[in-house]
Amino acid sequence: MVVPQEILGLVGRFENNREAYRSGTYNETQLRREFVDPFFKILGWDVNNEKGYAEAYKDVIHEDSIKVGGVTKAPDYCFRIGGTRKFFVETKKPSINLKDDISPAFQLRRYAWSAKLSCVYLLTSKSSLFTTSDILKYHFVRLNTN
């Protein structure tokens, strides 16, 4: 599968400014607005409800509300089809290393378990196992083949 040029552009921009993005000052909201939202928009998701769907039928819910252990939590993104939850995406600022810090993965697994979802994605850009390019390309291919 060929990765769209727009996604390669996001990857290139990140790679060109990697050190600035991985500094502790670049936060999760910046990552979401500058990279994650555009990424899913390129994949065809109506991230900003540009179609004007009613709340019950939006493709993407930002900071969705779920109960986890009796407490209300908010996954960064809930992706839905026809109003039915399909998967969550949780983002972390690029300075977080998911290999060394397991708490974000545990957090997302709890969200999925509580919502009875089998598919979730945890996005950050810092990993000693994959480059940002590998992660974005993997998620593009995975989302378009399932």
Image: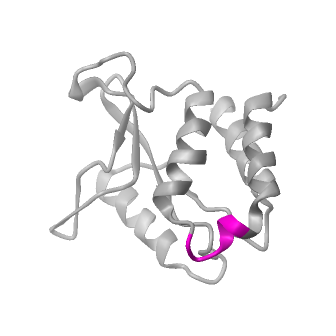
Residue in the picture at 52% in, 55% down: 30
Examine the rendered structure and indicate whether residue 48 appears above or below residue 72. Answer: above
- Residue range (magenta): 20-25
Examine the rendered structure and indicate whether residue 59 appears above or below residue 85. Answer: above
- x and y percentages locating residue 17 in the rendered image: 76, 59
- x and y percentages locating residue 58 in the rendered image: 32, 27
Residue found farthest to the top: 51
Examine the rendered structure and indicate whether residue 39 appears above or below residue 127. Answer: above
- x and y percentages locating residue 11 in the rendered image: 77, 47
- x and y percentages locating residue 118 in the rendered image: 46, 50
Q: Is residue 83 left or right of residue 123?
A: left
Q: Nearer the viewer, residue 39 or 27?
A: 27
Q: Nearer the viewer, residue 133 or 31?
A: 31
Image quadrant where one finds the N terminus: top right
Residue found farthest to the left: 70
Q: Is residue 91 left or right of residue 15?
A: left
Q: Name which quarter of the figure residue 102 lies in.
A: bottom right
Residue in the picture at 15% in, 68% down: 70
78 in magenta: no
Display colour scheme: one colour
Residue in the picture at 80% in, 56% down: 15
Q: Nearer the viewer, residue 77 or 19?
A: 19
Residue found farthest to the bottom: 100
Residue 121 in sight in this render = no
Callout count: 0
